[in-house]
Amino acid sequence: MKFFDKYLNKFIGLLIILNVLHQILTSGYELSDKNLYFSNIFVLVSFIIFIIEFITRLILERKISTLSAVDLIVIINFFFLNFIDLRIFRIFRAYSIFSNHRILLPTNTLLKTIWKQRLSILGTQIVVFSLLLIFSVIIHFLEKDLQPEAFGNILDSMWYGIATLTTVGYGDVTPITDLGKLISSFAMFLGIAMFALPAAILASAYYEDIQKRNFLVSLEAITEINLFSNLPIGAITKINSKLEPIVLPAKQIIFEKGDIADALYIIEFGSVQVEIENPVILGAGDFFGETGLISDAKRNATISVQEEAKLLRLSKDSLQELTEEFSSLFEELKLSADNRTG
């Protein structure tokens, strides 16, 4: 599992990106026989690797997630249906693989926000669709006799209704009657208001999620952590400069038993699970990883994220520098390590 997450996963992500680029660059172009041969070999080898990766993931996760279902559809289509090239849909798997990269973090946050707010967004779109139907029916009865080719039935009227409510206004169809123009003007203003509503919902939720993942660590947040609560402000300021914030998704393994102890971790929000005989859950304000650093030993337990968490990572070198300057910090860590090892 560790090898899969650290190495194979990233390789698959890069291979997916290469396949998407290949799909884009080869679309609509006639390749020479030689280039076509190498192109087909690349795609075939890629899908063989994708199958191996899919089976491996299925064995490890023991379930088919939404992304795995999409992967399966893409694979089946390539080998059996060959309807259209569906490789582009695997871009979401690449987003998932590189979800913790700082460049992709905002993109993945937006996708998660859309998913979490799906019911609210769906509710607003149902209202918009209802208004579209009402408007299309009214404009149909007002204009059908004067413009039967454009408003002869409700479905044709809906084309004008969509262009009006979205304020796109193609100009290919316009009402003639004064009442039709008045209602159309009202629909344009209503469309602006209705489509601003889901945008406001998404913007608010997205801002909230981004704030939760803000990589800046405040002095106030550090002083609320028990480990640092008794240190002077000078020490807090120095610690602040050495902490490395990271955001990890649920089920992500932070480190495994037997790994080299290279850092101390502090939980700012979320929770992690210490996978021992009787699993222990650590939450906001707790810290872990100090035992291996104090005793200069390897990790004695596997720790994974239980629910999405923001961790503050303090490297071994930085911790050693701080404990040499602030002896009380070392004493607190040693006491914690002794208590946890019994």
Image (spheres, rainbow, N blue to C red):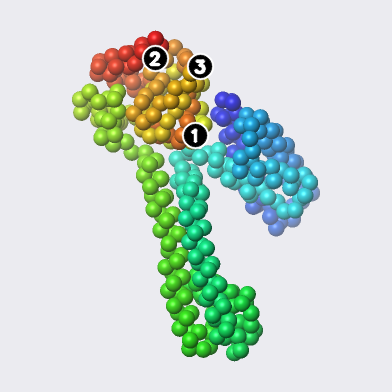
Looking at the rendered structure, the kind of residue marked 2 is: Arg
Looking at the rendered structure, the kind of residue marked 3 is: Glu
Please say if 117 is above or below 306.
below
Q: Determine which of the numbered discs, if any, sits on residue 229 in the image.
A: none
Looking at the rendered structure, the kind of residue marked 1 is: Ala
Tag 3 residue: 277
Tag 1 residue: 250
Q: Are marks 1 and 3 in contact (CB under 8 Å)?
A: no
Question: Which is nearer the N-term, disc 1 or disc 2?
Answer: 1
Please say if 100 is above or below 160.
above
**Residue located at (72% from left, 53% from top):** 84
Quadrant of the frame with the N terminus:
top right
Tag 2 residue: 340
Please say if 35 is above or below 277.
below
How many angstroms separate mark 1 from mark 3 (CA)?
A: 21 Å
Question: Which is nearer the N-term, disc 1 or disc 3?
Answer: 1
